[in-house]
């Protein structure tokens, strides 16, 4: 018998019991830790906060902890939040690596509910704080993806450039300018550092008179454009065009005879066809992947450089 075994054998009975209990507790802790670890595999740590924090919360009918972290499998769930004297909340939530928060605020349903909400105002402020932090984080991430947003809005007496979001949370650049100031606004956009204008949705509120085009078989691109837009071309001129293989590009601009002034350039892109030429897309102050009629990115960039 080894010395260690003899020492254990010679221990008082009470110490043996205590030692056994300690070992059992240690083993139990390890088992609980392993069970917890295994039960969380494939799940996401989701921060759940719905004010007031004593409201009962259910995901697909299963109760979850409010004002705490819950480990939930990615997917789409129906959230139900209930508390006496408050209007029940039911909404669809999507849990993913990019969306690991469930946040909400219950609306009081009666006077007693309003009193409770006032008493638990810290709960509401905590939810608003997290919401604000997430909004700021999302805003920074969006600006990294869409650098132009770092410069907007721009406002002066000649034009304004702002933005909004579409349903896919992608920015729409909104340019407001009279026709005579279009070129100034476009030039400002071109000067923005690290911004590839072709990749954006850019909308000008200026009236675009080039909506109707008459297809024709003119072989000369300038004649093709002039004939195609017909009467609209009165008072308009074409800048010197550029041949780019299968494409031809130029601009249409307004000309003020009295002031001998040119302004309001609209980019025009043609593509060769069996009949001669075809108009790729409606002329625009700037052509992008959004409004460029499927033309290659490098061609659109070349048109915008005119």
Image: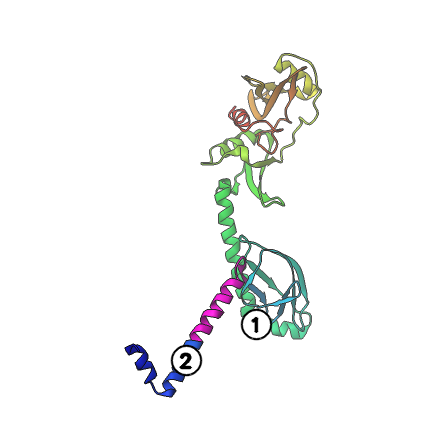
Find residue 20 and name its label.
2
Q: For mark 1, does the 10 Å Cα neighbourhood hold few (<14), some (14 to 19), or many (20 or more) residues? A: some
Q: Residue furthest left?
A: 3
Which stretch appears magenta?
Answer: 25-47
Q: Nearer the viewer, residue 120 or 272?
A: 272
Q: Nearer the viewer, residue 95 or 164?
A: 95
Task: Choose the circle earlier in sequence order: 1 or 2.
Answer: 2
- Asked if residue 237 is positioned above or below residue 37 in the image, the reply reads above
Residue 264 shows in this picture: yes
Q: Nearer the viewer, residue 222 or 39?
A: 39
Where disc 1 sits, the SS reads loop
Can residue 65 be found in the magenta stretch?
A: no
- Residue at position x 65%, y 31% in the image: 207
Q: Residue furthest top?
A: 219
- Asked if residue 70 is positioned above or below residue 296 in the image, the reply reads below
Q: Residue furthest front?
A: 1
| 3D distance between C-alphas at marks 1 and 2 | 47 Å
- Residue at position x 52%, y 57% in the image: 132
- Residue at position x 65%, y 20% in the image: 278
Residue 107 shows in this picture: no
How many numbered discs?
2
Mark 1 = which residue?
A: 120
Horizontal side of residue 12 vs 274, given as left or right: left
Q: Nearer the viewer, residue 177 or 297?
A: 297
State the image coordinates of residue 245 (x, y, percent, origin top left). 55, 17
Horizontal side of residue 220 vs 196, given as left or right: right
Where disc 2 sits, the SS reads helix
- Asked if residue 168 is positioned above or below residue 117 in the image, the reply reads above
State the image coordinates of residue 102 (x, y, percent, origin top left). 58, 60
């Amino acid at each position: 018998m080894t010395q260690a075994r003899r020492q254990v054998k010679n221990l008082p009975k009470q110490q043996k019991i205590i030692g056994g209990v300690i070992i059992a507790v240690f083993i139990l802790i390890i088992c609980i830790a392993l069970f917890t670890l295994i039960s969380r595999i494939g799940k996401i740590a989701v921060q759940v906060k719905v004010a007031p924090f004593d409201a009962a919360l259910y995901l697909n009918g299963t109760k979850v902890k409010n004002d705490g972290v819950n480990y939930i499998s990615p997917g789409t769930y129906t959230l139900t939040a209930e508390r006496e004297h408050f209007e029940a909340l039911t909404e669809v939530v999507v849990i993913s690596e990019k969306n690991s928060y469930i946040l909400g605020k219950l609306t009081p349903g009666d006077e007693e509910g309003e009193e409770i909400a006032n008493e638990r105002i810290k709960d509401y402020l905590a939810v608003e704080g997290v919401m604000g932090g997430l909004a700021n984080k999302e805003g920074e991430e969006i600006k990294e993806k869409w650098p132009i947003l770092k410069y907007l809005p721009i406002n002066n007496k000649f034009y304004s450039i702002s933005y909004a979001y579409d349903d896919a949370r992608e920015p729409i650049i909104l340019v407001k300018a009279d026709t005579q100031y279009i070129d100034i606004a476009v030039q400002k956009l071109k000067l923005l550092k690290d911004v590839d204008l072709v990749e954006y949705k850019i909308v000008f509120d200026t009236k675009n008179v080039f909506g109707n085009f008459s297809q024709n078989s003119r072989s000369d691109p300038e004649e093709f454009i002039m004939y195609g837009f017909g009467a609209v071309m009165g008072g308009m001129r074409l800048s010197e065009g550029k041949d780019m293989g299968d494409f031809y590009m130029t601009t249409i601009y307004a000309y003020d005879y009295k002031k001998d002034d040119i302004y309001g350039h609209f980019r025009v892109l043609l593509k060769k066809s069996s009949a001669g030429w075809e108009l790729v897309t409606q002329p625009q102050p700037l052509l992008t992947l959004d409004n460029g009629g499927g033309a290659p990115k490098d061609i659109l960039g070349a048109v915008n450089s005119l």
